[in-house]
Image: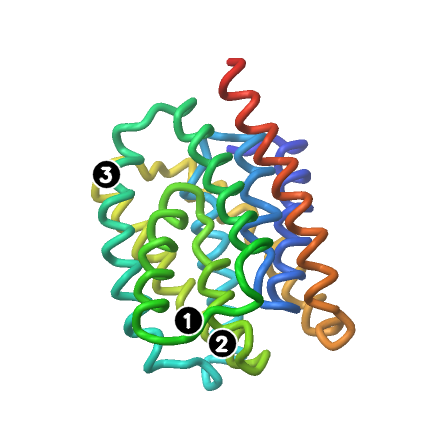
Amino acid sequence: MLDLAALLLSGVAVFLGAALQGGTGTGLALVATPIVQLLRPGLMPGAMLVVAFGLALLAVADEAGHADWSGLRWALGGRLLGTACSAWAVAVTTAKGLSLISGAVILVVAAMAALAPAWLPRNRLTLVGSGVFAGVAGTTVALGGPLIALVYRRSPAATMRGSLGVFTTFGSLLSLVCLGMVGVLSWGQITGGLALLPFVGAGFLVASRVRDRLRPDSVRGAVLVMAVLAAAWLILRSVAG
C-alpha cells in the first residue's frame, strides 16, 4: 500500500494531471506518471493504468457522443499490437530497467509533442501508427495518449476529449489484461491505483469548471517542462543506482 506521504504527493500529481487532461485533453500521464514512478516504482505501470482508466470513464460518460468512432477502430487495432509486444517486454525487465525505460519513453513523448507539427493528418496510417506507439508507451509507463492527441489536435475540443476518453478506456483495460496475463500485474498496483481515484475525480470536477479558461498551448509548455525534468531524474537515478 502507499504510505501517507507517497499517497498525498502522488495524489496531488494525479489531481493536477486529471484537471489538465479534463480541460485540454492531455496532461495526466505526463504529469503524474513520472512522479508515481519516482515515489513508488513498484506500483508501475498498473496503478497509473487504473488511474487512466478511471479518468477515461469519466470523460466517456461526459463526451462519448462526440468521439470519432470510425477512426478509433484503427487506433485501437494498433494499440492491441503494441500492447501485446510490450507486455512481454515488461515481464522480462527488471525494476531498474523499467525505471530507465520509463524515463526514456517520457523524454521521447515530450520531444514528439514539442517538435512534431502542431497536428498530424488524421488517416488510417497515423491512427494505426499512433495506436501502436500508444500500446508500447501505455503498457510500459501508462503514457498512451499524447500521440493520439496530436492526431486529433485540430478536431473540435469535445471530439478530441471524447476520442481520447474512448481510446484510453479500452486501451488501459487492454494493457491491464495483458499485464495480468504475463503475470506482472499485482494487487498492490491495483489497490494503489484505486487509492488514487478520488484525486482523479476531484481533478475532473475542477476541469469542468475551468475548461473554458485554460489555454492549451501555454499549459502544454509547462507540462512538457515538468515531464522532461522528472524523466531526466528517473534516468539519472536508474544509471547511478
Q: Circle 1: is it few (<14), some (14-19), or many (20+) Cα within 10 Å?
A: many
- Secondary structure of residue under mark 2: helix
Q: CA distance from mark 2 to mark 3?
A: 30 Å
Q: Quadrant of residue 5?
A: top right
Image point 44% across, 48% down: which residue?
A: 142
Does 56 appear above or below 155?
A: above
> Is residue 127 left or right of 154 when viewed as pictured?
left
Q: Circle 2: is it few (<14), some (14-19), or many (20+) Cα within 10 Å?
A: many
Q: Which residue is disc 1 drawn over?
A: 166
Image point 35% across, 23% down: which residue?
A: 94
Image point 56% across, 48% down: which residue?
A: 110
> Is residue 19 left or right of 122 when viewed as pictured?
right
Q: Which mark is residue 162?
A: 2
Image point 52% across, 62% down: which residue?
A: 55
Q: Residue furthest top?
A: 241
| Marks 3 & 1, CB-CB < 8 Å contact | no
Q: CA distance from mark 1 to mark 2?
A: 6 Å
Q: CA distance from mark 3 to mark 1?
A: 25 Å
Q: Amino acid at mark 3?
A: Trp
Residue 178 image offset from top left, x and y in percent: 25, 48
Q: Amino acid at mark 1?
A: Val
| Marks 2 & 3, CB-CB < 8 Å contact | no
Does 160 appear above or below 188?
A: below
Q: Which mark is residue 88?
A: 3
- Secondary structure of residue under mark 1: helix
